[in-house]
């Protein structure tokens, strides 16, 4: 009888432990709507204004989720024999915030790289016109020079290198690219 | 025997007749009882031997034994147990059940032979699978490193490294969700979602470690598909009057200037007989690790751990409570945080960090902050029949924060200093087991278990979705022991229900609940045959399964460090393993060996495969890897051999070979460890009263290049093979009658430049170079026996 009693108390102990396991199961674990939001560059805008005057060429690359699922990149039409004043803007669509100014504020840790590839290589030259406190290029403003010649196509690769691991020297890209976009470019007569 | 067919024809009916006539009365007698120590506590594991019949039995954990199928008559029965004087009794067996209780007197002098014999017995019959054991003494020689590094020296074991501070144990080519870590009886529930997530284990915990290699699903449930790492705390002192005792250990590593210290104390409460306690704490701090030619930037870490264990034994009851805390902050080599594929390829081409930094103890981003808290309560109740109940409740909270390499552009976001992601996993588990009383030669256990988990993300980015899961299982296992044979069989059923909250379209959209449930069987059949003195042969046939984990289902995003865009598959099915394992063990006077060959067939093995179309995002191009399933096979061979050349010199060899093949496309499995061979020479030097048992050891570790890989899939081909030379000297110094254990070693003595294939940073940096290591341990109070 004594042992029966002890067995009963043992079973109660187990049931109590089992209760500890089941009771916390009421919280469904459903995330809050605003959970998981971090900074994300979702929109990059290039504005190229002909130096001689005229309407600016505006091209937008947009990746609203940052995962490429809905990535759209506008094509750029440039006219041979024209020089453009360029500007680039970055926007975080998740937090609804323009972060161009932040890049400017941390310009000693950032540099844009513009590379003409394909048929436009050698025809399109990009020169960065702004510099940071160390007199190294930034790339928020630049000029785009298109030589005169035949119509052709290619891509303009735009990279934003982030330097907090290796120091910025102005000569090499870093291993941390914050953006890396290929804009299709057509030289139209 | 002139006509064998005729005699065989006659044999069966004659035996049947004899059996039916006399069998019942001739062999129906049993001898049973209990073996106790002088203080009336039961003695589990004591031997009972009938010399005339050459038959025996072993007492169960309640000290009970039973020998059946005895004929009526008089027998001489020997009762023996390690550390006790043997008792010989002459017993007259009368029809029916015969009871014989024996009390053994403690032997004042534990002779070495007795100890050796008992250890030999347990080594030969430890498991039907291959098992590698690190006891407290062996652990003292390797303490201060991560669990993966600690176990790396064992046959069949390798480590998946992410820099110097993170390493995951790999059992025969398998790791993470396929290897279960059992800490103080509770299955460790950490955040094991990637190769850079290491088990949260205190390297100084006073435990004994057992690695069970192969399928162990019946005893340990769904996680144990490839192996089990068991960390069992050392027994508490319970005997009243035991003086306060403990151990202080400290160590220093020259390479990363790691300093570590640990202390544990244990004792009893003399006013409360049956109560024992132990308190333990440890601290580690290390700076940047150094490869032979450069410092590995941001690889410093620090860790602080503590544990409290309380035990109480009274009558048939036994309670054991355990609380532990693990906390670490570790830096991750920043050069491994890669922007995109172009960046990765440039870093591989460069072959070394972009900046050669200076040594420091600072931990900057990227870094991980991890805590793991465990509380467990175990209770046992033994019935007078010898049957016993065990129940266990475990609570675990795992909290992981990972900080990205650079802070957000936005000042308002940066000011929050949020981790890139933050996960907290709460697990409640319960288990009940019932060990039936030994029936004849049968020992058995049945039980059931349940677990409830909740994983919640912090406010920052998502790595895996929030989820809630319930699991439950029931199992039964019987072992039959008869002389040289031990046979076991068991089965288990497990069920798991998971509701996760992934985003609707992978990376975007609303959070939507998705429910999956799984249920299936595990089974085991094994045998050990001690076919000659000091030799045994064991075999094990086991099948186990596991449901896909949440990351395999719902991962969606870039994996830092490898620039891989990983995509889970919500439709994955459970994977199943069927393994066979044959182990030969020998524990002779001059040779000890364990040689094991195995083959495990997987159905629906879950793995990552490269998708030919890369992912183009605003941040650049990433190679895409998707989770998929295929049949696979892992075959291999582990061996460890020790040979005493004479009383001075012992030679040792440890080898691990594993082959993994995807059977569906007939390609090698990714990330299988290269073949390994360790050669060890151990020399006992002559000691004195103050310098006891000095010994010197040289180790040569050879790792072959992994030549089995699918060309063109990985960013860089497997690195070349390498050779490391290690050496150590150890002794017990008598200082004021206290034996201070001193262990001095040098790792990678030749400062060899190498990269291991299982190092996740092999794309960027060399593995660490030479390190001098000093380890000290000082017993406090009377040393533990």
Image (cartoon, coloured by chain):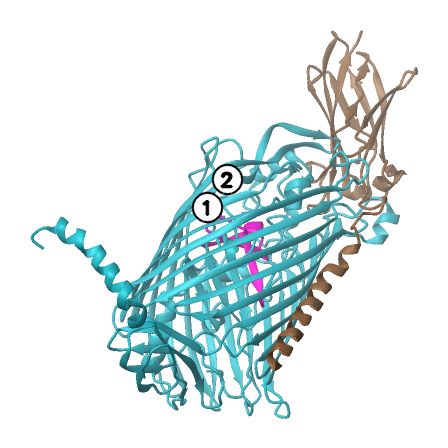
Q: Which mark is residue B578?
A: 1
x then y, percent, for residue B678: 38, 57
- Quadrant hosting residue B58: bottom left
Task: Judge whether residue B532 can be spotted in this image.
Answer: no
State which chain is coloured brown: A
Residue B773, above or below B277: above
Is B299 in front, or is A55?
A: B299
Q: Chain of mark 1?
A: B
Q: Which residue is mark 2?
A: B603
Task: Judge whether residue B433 can be spotted in this image.
Answer: yes
State which chain is coloured cyan: B
Q: Earlier in the sequence, mark 2 or mark 1?
A: 1
x 59%, y 49%: residue: B195
Q: Is residue B266 inside the magenta stretch? A: no
Instruction: Give the quadrant of the N terminus of chain B.
Output: bottom left
* B251 left or right, relative to B70: right
Residue A142, above or below B310: above
Start and end of the magenta stretch? Answer: B157-185
The residue at the far left in this view is: B2
Residue B562, above or below A4: above
Q: Chain of mark 2?
A: B
Mark 2 and mark 1 residues within 8 Å of each other at the beta carbon? yes
x then y, percent, for residue B700: 38, 58
Callout 1: few (<14), some (14-19), or many (20+) C-alpha neighbours within 10 Å? many
Callout 2: few (<14), some (14-19), or many (20+) C-alpha neighbours within 10 Å? some
Is B172 in front, or is A53?
A: B172
């Amino acid at each position: 009888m004594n042992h029966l009693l002890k067995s009963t108390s043992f079973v109660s102990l187990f049931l109590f432990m089992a209760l500890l396991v089941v009771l916390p199961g009421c919280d469904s674990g459903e995330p809050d709507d605003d959970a998981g939001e971090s900074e994300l560059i979702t929109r990059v805008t290039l504005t190229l204004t002909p130096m001689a005057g005229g309407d600016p060429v505006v091209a937008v690359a947009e990746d609203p989720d940052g995962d490429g699922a809905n990535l759209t990149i506008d094509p750029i039409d440039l006219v041979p024999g024209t020089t453009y004043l360029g500007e680039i803007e970055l926007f975080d669509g998740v937090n609804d915030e323009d972060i161009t100014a932040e890049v400017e504020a941390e310009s000693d840790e950032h540099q844009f790289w513009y590379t003409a590839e394909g048929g436009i290589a050698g025809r399109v030259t990009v020169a960065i016109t702004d510099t940071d406190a160390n007199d190294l290029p930034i790339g928020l403003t630049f000029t785009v020079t298109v030589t005169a010649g035949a119509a052709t196509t290619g891509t303009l690769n735009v990279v934003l290198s982030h330097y907090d691991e290796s120091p910025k020297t102005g000569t090499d890209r870093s291993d941390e690219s914050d953006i890396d976009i290929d804009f299709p470019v057509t030289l139209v007569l | 025997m002139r006509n064998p067919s005729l005699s065989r024809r006659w044999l069966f009916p004659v035996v049947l007749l004899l059996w039916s006539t006399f069998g019942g009365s001739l062999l129906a007698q049993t001898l049973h009882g209990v073996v106790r120590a002088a203080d009336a506590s039961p003695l589990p594991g004591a031997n009972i031997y009938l010399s005339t019949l050459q038959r025996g039995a072993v007492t169960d954990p309640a000290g009970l034994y039973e020998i059946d199928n005895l004929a009526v008559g008089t027998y001489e029965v020997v009762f023996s147990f390690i550390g006790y004087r043997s008792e010989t009794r002459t017993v007259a067996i009368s029809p029916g059940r015969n009871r014989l209780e024996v009390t053994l007197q403690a032997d004042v002098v534990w002779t070495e032979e007795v100890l050796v014999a008992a250890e030999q017995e347990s080594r030969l019959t430890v498991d039907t699978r291959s098992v590698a054991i690190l006891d407290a003494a062996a652990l003292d020689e390797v303490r201060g490193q991560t669990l993966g590094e600690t176990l790396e020296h064992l046959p069949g074991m390798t480590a998946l490294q992410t820099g110097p501070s993170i390493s995951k144990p790999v059992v025969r080519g398998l790791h993470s969700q396929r290897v279960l870590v059992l800490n103080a009886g509770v299955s460790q529930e950490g955040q094991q979602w990637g190769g850079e997530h290491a088990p949260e284990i205190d390297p100084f915990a006073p435990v004994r470690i057992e690695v069970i290699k192969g399928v162990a699903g019946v005893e340990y449930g769904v996680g144990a598909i490839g192996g089990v790492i068991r960390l069992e705390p050392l027994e508490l002192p319970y005997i009243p009057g035991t003086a306060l005792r403990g151990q202080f250990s400290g160590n220093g590593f020259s390479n990363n200037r790691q300093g570590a210290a640990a202390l544990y104390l244990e004792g009893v409460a003399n006013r409360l007989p049956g109560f024992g306690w132990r308190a333990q704490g440890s601290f580690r701090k290390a700076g940047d690790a150094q490869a032979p030619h450069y410092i590995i930037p941001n690889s410093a870490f620090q860790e602080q751990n503590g544990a409290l264990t309380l035990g109480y034994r009274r009558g048939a009851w036994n309670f054991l409570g355990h609380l532990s805390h693990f906390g670490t902050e570790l830096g991750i080599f920043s050069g491994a945080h890669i922007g995109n594929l172009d960046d990765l390829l440039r870093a591989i081409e460069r072959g070394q960090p972009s900046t050669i930094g200076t040594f420091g103890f600072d931990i900057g981003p990227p870094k991980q902050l991890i805590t793991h808290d465990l509380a467990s309560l175990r209770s046992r109740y033994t019935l007078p029949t010898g049957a016993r109940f065990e129940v266990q409740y475990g609570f675990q909270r795992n909290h992981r924060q990972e900080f990205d390499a650079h802070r957000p552009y936005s000042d308002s976001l940066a000011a929050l200093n949020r981790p890139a992601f933050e996960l907290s996993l709460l697990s409640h588990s319960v288990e009940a087991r019932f060990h039936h009383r030994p029936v004849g030669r049968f020992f058995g256990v049945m039980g059931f278990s349940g677990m409830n988990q909740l994983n919640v993300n912090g406010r920052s980015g998502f790595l895996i979705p929030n989820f809630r899961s319930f699991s439950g299982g029931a199992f039964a296992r019987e072992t039959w022991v008869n002389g040289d044979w031990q046979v076991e069989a068991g089965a288990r059923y497990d069920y798991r229900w998971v509701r996760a909250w992934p985003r609707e379209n992978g990376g975007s959209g609303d959070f939507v609940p998705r429910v999956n449930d799984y249920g299936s069987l595990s089974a085991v059949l094994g045998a050990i045959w001690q076919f000659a003195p000091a030799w045994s042969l064991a075999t094990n046939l086991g099948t186990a399964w596991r449901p896909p984990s949440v990351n395999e289902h719902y991962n969606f995003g870039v994996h830092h460090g490898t620039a891989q865009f990983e995509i889970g598959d919500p439709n994955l099915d459970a994977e199943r393993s069927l393994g066979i394992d044959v182990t030969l063990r020998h524990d002779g006077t001059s040779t000890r060996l364990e040689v094991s060959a195995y083959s495990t067939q997987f159905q629906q093995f879950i793995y990552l495969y490269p998708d030919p179309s890369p992912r183009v995002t605003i941040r650049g191009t990433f190679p895409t890897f998707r989770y998929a399933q295929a049949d696979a096979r892992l075959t291999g061979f582990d061996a460890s051999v020790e040979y005493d050349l004479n009383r001075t010199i012992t030679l040792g060899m440890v080898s691990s070979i594993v082959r993994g093949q995807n059977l569906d496309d007939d390609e090698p499995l990714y990330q299988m460890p290269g073949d390994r061979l360790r050669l060890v020479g151990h020399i006992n030097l002559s000691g004195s009263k103050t310098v006891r048992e000095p010994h010197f050891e040289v180790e040569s570790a050879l790792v072959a290049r992994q030549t089995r890989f699918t060309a063109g899939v990985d960013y860089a081909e497997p690195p070349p093979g390498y050779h490391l030379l290690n050496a150590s000297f150890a002794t017990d110094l008598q200082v004021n009658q206290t034996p201070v254990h001193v262990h001095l070693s040098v790792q990678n003595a030749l400062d060899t430049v190498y990269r291991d294939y299982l190092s996740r940073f092999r794309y960027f940096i060399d593995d660490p170079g030479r390190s001098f290591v000093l380890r000290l341990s000082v017993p406090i109070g009377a040393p533990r026996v």
